[in-house]
Image (cartoon, rainbow, N blue to C red):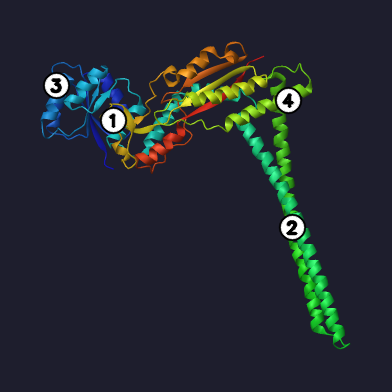
């Protein structure tokens, strides 16, 4: 793909340099003009792929310059993006009416700039997005570290619970396989031995009915009947022995893992969500089983929500109510956090309603008008149904119990993806199928420090 070229029109050198650095990160060559008049003169001799136009400049302002560019047949098809501190729906509408494709703020984030370049077809290399996310991750490293420490605070996390459950199931499966092999070998041996006895008896009778001399054919048959079953049994028991050795090795590894989990669980039950052990061992074990059941139940729930749906709706309220009831029964003392992570959808503006809608599945990815989520700028309250809001305000287990409930609506920048977008995605349908999997609510438990 040939290198693209951009013209940045701004009387502020600092603003020009800041935008130049971001554009060159995506391999876009940058030229400058300090006024609308200079931009028009430049375009008479040079061709560019996109223009970034400031609004307030000496002489001709940004809107006047856009009008002049769109009035010239040689430059009318060049996309113009207003690059200004001005904002508001009225200003955006005026800019688009004059022919601008949109408005970018002076403090535009690299991710927003990249999505705009992608929509205009000026970048196609997904590695640029990877470099951008890597650089953003370096700047957000401290926040990520804090969040990682918070996730580790639970001790016996949901992930550890799932791992332990799978290991137990694996051990049970190994045991069933060994038992099945032993039973199969026993039944084969009984069947072969029965056939051997019947055929030996038949051979003996034939030998007695014939001559008294040695019948080498009968001897050979008897040898075959003896050797083949023995070889088959040896093979079966060798396989069973190998599987037994593998199971023993797996059991050793599982015992080590279980021992480590036991230490974590012991510390959790002693000074964790259930509080210090003041009750009997039976009560603590019962409460622990209820807590484990609550964690297992939470991980099995479908917490995804569709495009345009509220993440904290009546269905989510049922899940939260059930989880809080289980935690209350386990004596959990701490907080429960619900994080709504937003998927990045390929969207278009509905001409009838003026709202965002999903692009048609066959739409090329480069034709997406906006890549994002309608809830990206919403408040947590705007993402809740009326019943959910009433529950947060008046639920007895929250107002009088020992459990706090926190509801977080992640924005586009701090939402975490379950699945990244492969570089070979070309249509809106493929892109939105992945975005739908990232559109979800996650449950987290944080015991209160003792």
Query: Are the residues flagged by discs 2 and 1 in contact, CB closer than 8 Å?
Result: no
Among the two numbered marks 2 and 1 on one chain, the one whose residue lies closer to the N terminus: 2
Q: CA distance from mark 4 to mark 2?
A: 40 Å
The part of the image, by quadrant, that contains residue 64 is top left
* Foreground label between 3 and 4: 4
Residue 320 position within the rendered picture, expressed as x and y whole percent measured from the top left = 55, 23
Element class at badge 4: helix
Alpha carbon separation for disc pair 2 and 3:
88 Å
Name which quarter of the figure residue 380 lies in.
top left
Cα separation, mark 3 vs mark 4, equals 75 Å
Residue 141: x and y in percent read 48, 24
Residue count near mark 1 (Cα–Cα under 10 Å), binned few <14, some 14–19, many ≥20: few
Q: Answer whether labels 3 and 4 touch (C-beta < 8 Å).
A: no
Q: Which residue is mark 1?
A: 350
Residue 304: mark: none
Q: Which mark is residue 184?
A: 2
């Amino acid at each position: 793909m040939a290198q693209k070229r951009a013209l940045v029109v701004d009387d502020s050198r600092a603003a020009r340099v800041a935008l130049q650095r971001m554009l060159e990160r995506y391999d876009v060559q940058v030229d400058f003009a300090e006024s609308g008049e200079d931009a028009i003169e430049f375009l008479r001799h040079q061709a560019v792929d996109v223009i970034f136009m400031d609004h307030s400049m000496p002489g001709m302002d940004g809107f006047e310059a856009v009008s002049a560019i769109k009035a010239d047949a040689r430059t009318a098809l060049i996309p113009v993006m207003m690059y200004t501190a001005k904002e508001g729906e009225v200003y955006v509408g005026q800019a688009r009416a004059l022919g601008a494709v949109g408005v970018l703020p002076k403090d535009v984030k690299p991710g927003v700039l990249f999505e705009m370049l992608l929509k205009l077809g000026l970048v196609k290399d997904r590695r640029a997005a990877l470099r951008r996310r890597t650089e953003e991750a370096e700047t957000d490293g401290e926040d990520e570290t804090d969040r990682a420490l918070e996730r580790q605070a639970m001790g016996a996390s949901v992930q550890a619970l799932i791992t332990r459950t799978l290991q137990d199931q694996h051990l049970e499966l190994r045991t069933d396989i060994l038992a099945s092999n032993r039973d199969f070998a026993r039944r084969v041996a009984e069947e072969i031995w029965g056939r051997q006895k019947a055929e030996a008896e038949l051979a003996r009778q034939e030998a007695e009915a014939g001559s008294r001399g040695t019948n080498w054919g009968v001897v050979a048959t008897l040898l075959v009947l003896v050797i083949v079953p023995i070889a088959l049994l040896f093979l079966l028991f060798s396989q069973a022995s190998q599987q037994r050795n593998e199971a023993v090795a797996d059991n050793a590894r599982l015992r080590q893992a279980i021992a480590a989990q036991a230490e974590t669980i012991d510390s959790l039950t002693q000074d964790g969500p259930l509080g210090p052990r003041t009750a009997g061992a039976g009560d603590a074990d019962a409460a622990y089983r209820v807590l484990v059941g609550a964690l297992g139940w939470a991980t099995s729930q479908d917490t995804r929500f569709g495009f345009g749906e509220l993440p904290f709706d009546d269905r989510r309220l049922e899940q939260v109510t059930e989880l809080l009831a289980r935690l209350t029964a386990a004596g959990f003392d701490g907080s429960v956090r619900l994080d709504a992570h937003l998927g990045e959808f390929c969207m278009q503006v509905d001409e009838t309603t003026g709202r965002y809608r999903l692009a048609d599945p066959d739409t090329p990815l480069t034709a997406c008008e906006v890549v994002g989520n309608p809830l990206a700028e919403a408040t947590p309250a705007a993402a809740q149904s009326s019943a959910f809001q009433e529950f947060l305000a008046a639920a007895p287990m929250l107002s009088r119990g020992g459990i706090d409930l926190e509801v977080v609506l992640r924005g586009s920048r701090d939402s975490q993806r379950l699945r990244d977008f492969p570089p070979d995605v070309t249509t809106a349908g493929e892109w939105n199928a992945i975005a739908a999997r990232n559109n979800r609510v996650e449950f987290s438990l944080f015991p209160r420090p003792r």
